Image (tube, rainbow, N blue to C red):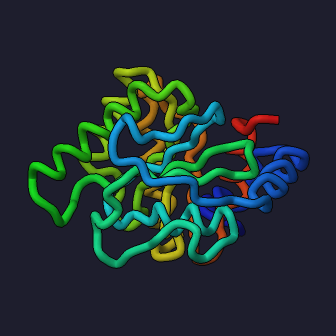
Amino acid sequence: MMSQTEKIFMESKYTADEYEAGRILFAQNCEFILSAVSDETLPQSTLNEIAFAGRSNVGKSSLINALTSRKTLARTSNTPGRTQQINFFQLEKKLMLVDLPGYGYAKASKTKIKDWSKFVLSYLKNRPQLSRICILIDSRRGIKKNDEAIMDYLDKISVSYQLVLTKCDKIKYDEMENLYNLTTDNLHSRFGAHPFITPTSSKKGQGLNDLRAELAKLAHH
């Protein structure tokens, strides 16, 4: 008999057309545009933007690479906090993928960390093109206080976000089921949260089709 966790991965949340739209979009050319270090250096673009946020070492770059079926599009690092800029990737002139600096850890001076935080919060609050923020949660760790702080901030400024569970191949099915239920409960009182939580594994490809289908809805057609 199929477990609840297996159903989480197997259940089709989207139509065949939506899955196909996601597949086609993310199979297109995706290229690095620039790394922004201040409001003045943000790209001048009208494309909708999907930002990927999360604690350092949660797997943001790995997820972007997996979604676009590229190994080195977004730089990954074994050193938490290494990504210091906001990195922009253009997907076939239809969507902009945005890799935000990790929060929760950074190997740098406190002044520098404060500067990153100020810039990122300004981007989240003032960027009209920002259509959705994917908040990545390490499935081995669950939601932490700094994740909740980011969600509180996004609720306050009325910016839409959705939770994406990463590294789901590294935990057992019963642990996955418990995490999924706890995460769902956490979102009940949050009006800025998207209703679907997407469990993923960049390594094994689980959940990527669901995420592609969801994000493709926000692309320019």
Q: Residue furthest right?
A: 17
Q: Is residue 19 above or below residue 74?
A: above
Find the residue positioned furthest to the left: 110
Along the viewing direction, whichever of 178 and 161 lies nearer the viewer: 161
Q: Position of residue 128 (x, y in %)?
A: 52, 24
Side (left or right) of 141 relative to 188: left
The residue positioned 84% from the left and 55% from the top of the image is 24
The location of residue 211, given as percent across then percent down, is: 66, 52
Give coordinates of residue 149: x percent, y percent. 27, 38
Q: Pick whichever, 9 or 63, lies toward us.
A: 63
Residue 146: percent from the left, percent from the top?
25, 46
Q: What's the residue at 16%, 44% (across, down)?
A: 114
The picture quadrant where one finds residue 155 is top left
Using the image, determine if residue 18 lies above or below residue 179. Answer: above
In the image, what residue occupies the spot 70% across and 36% down?
Answer: 218
Q: Front-most of 30 and 33?
A: 33
**Is 85 drawn above or below residue 66 in the view shown?**
above
- For residue 82, what is the image quadrant? bottom left
Q: Quadrant of residue 214?
A: top right
| For residue 209, side relative to residue 147 (left or right) | right
Q: Quadrant of the C terminus?
A: top right
Q: Nearer the viewer, residue 12 or 116?
A: 116
